[in-house]
Amino acid sequence: MYTATHLEWWLALLALVPPVVFAGLDAFYLRQERLFRQLYSAAIVPNSAVVVFSMDAAVFTDVARYPNCGYKGRNGVWRSKSWRYFHFMIVAVGLVLLGVAIFQALSSTKLT
């Protein structure tokens, strides 16, 4: 809210950092969730090769075999609609504020 009332370009640029960092952190945890879902799916199969009570999901990091468990790719975390829409809208608002701040900064220097 402070950025909207005291619009400075450097402040609007600084305000973009937390949403971008949060988007990366959210992508990390979404990937972890997908890895553990794969581990659970493998563990519930009768006579599974997964050790009982194992929490080692590193086996499922092979993106070629498990395309949903990667960041990139057709079914990767970054292609998740809910992740993209939520985080891109927040960053888009920040970019609009940054654009308005730069426009105001450029127009005020030209007038003086």
Image (tube, helix red, strand yellow):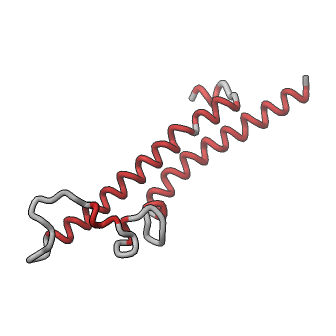
Which quadrant of the rendered structure holds the C terminus?
Answer: top right
Q: Position of residue 15 (x, y in %)?
A: 58, 34
In screen coordinates, is 88 left or right of 82? Answer: right
Judge whether 102 appears above or below 93 on screen. Answer: above
Q: Looking at the figure, which quarter contains the N terminus?
A: top right
Report whether 51 appears left or right of 8. Answer: left
Residue 13: x and y in percent read 64, 36
Q: Quadrant of residue 62?
A: bottom left
Vertical relation: 101 (above or below) 56: above
The residue closer to the viewer here, 23 or 70, is 70
Q: Position of residue 43 (x, y in %)?
A: 15, 69
Q: At 39% from the left edge and 52% from the top edge, which residue is drawn?
A: 28
Instruction: Please give left or right for residue 34 compared with residue 99 in the image.
Output: left
Q: Residue at x 48, y 60 (%)?
A: 78
The residue at the point 41 percent across, 49 percent down is 26
Please name whichever residue, 112 or 54, is drawn nearer the observer in this view of the structure.
54
Residue 39 sits in which quadrant?
A: bottom left
Left or right: 27 in relation to 98: left
Which of the two residues, 77 or 52, is positioned nearer the viewer here? 52
Please count the marks in the image. 0
Residue 80 x, y percent position in the rendering = 45, 63
Give the residue drawn at x 34%, y 64%.
Answer: 61
Query: Vertically, is 65 above or below 3?
Result: below
Residue found at the far top of this picture: 112
Quadrant in the picture for residue 46: bottom left
